[in-house]
Image (cartoon, rainbow, N blue to C red):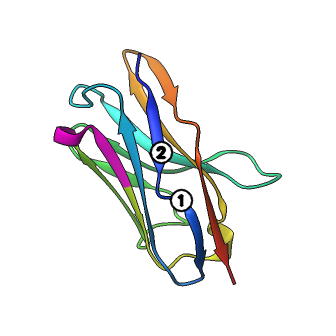
Amino acid sequence: QVQLVESGGGLVQAGGSLRLSCAASRSIFSINNMGWYRQAPGKQRELVATITNIGSTFYADSVKGRFTISRDNAKNTVYLQMNSLKPEDTAVYFCTAVRAGKDYWGQGTQVTVSS
């Protein structure tokens, strides 16, 4: 079992920055894949970024060059640095982990970007 707790969301103006954190309840050293998804009102949940246990990253086209995913295995935490935020980035952001073939999700944190 892995519990994931997101934090760092909030209200920010367009062009601003936020850093989301995802704290895991156990060591993430052996968790192959962790990432962030988001879900805007009335829309399907979409992948934002992922990072493997060796640091390989993937980004959705909509956030490339603006968002950076990273992980600190010593702190059991994954981060999402979000810069140059746009109103269309407004969504609930969810942390996810894949371990031993099972998917784990956090409760989500709200990010609202005002124009």
Report the quarter where the N terminus lies: top left
Residue at 40% across / 44% down in the picture?
A: 22
Query: Which image quarter: residue 40?
Result: bottom right
Mark 1 = which residue? Answer: 9
Residue at 49% across / 26% down in the picture?
A: 104
Task: From the top left corner, tell me how far across and down residue 52 is, in percent.
Answer: 29, 39
Task: From the top left corner, tell me how far across and down residue 48 is, in percent.
Answer: 52, 53
The residue sitting at the right extreme is 42
Is residue 78 highlighted in magenta? yes
Instruction: Identify the magenta region.
Output: 73-79
Report the quarter where the C terminus lies: bottom right
In this orientation, which residue lies closer to the viewer: 63 or 11? 11
Q: What's the CA distance linking mark 2 and mark 1?
A: 8 Å
Task: From the top left corner, tell me how far across and down residue 86 is, in percent.
Answer: 61, 77
Mark 2 closeness class: few <14, some 14–19, many ≥20 residues within 10 Å: many
Look at the numbered disc 2 and give the secondary structure of its residue. strand
Residue 75 appears left or right of 90:
left
Mark 2 = which residue? Answer: 6
Residue at 27% across / 31% down in the picture?
A: 28
Give the answer, above or below, for where 111 lies relative to 1. below
Look at the numbered disc 1 and give the secondary structure of its residue. loop
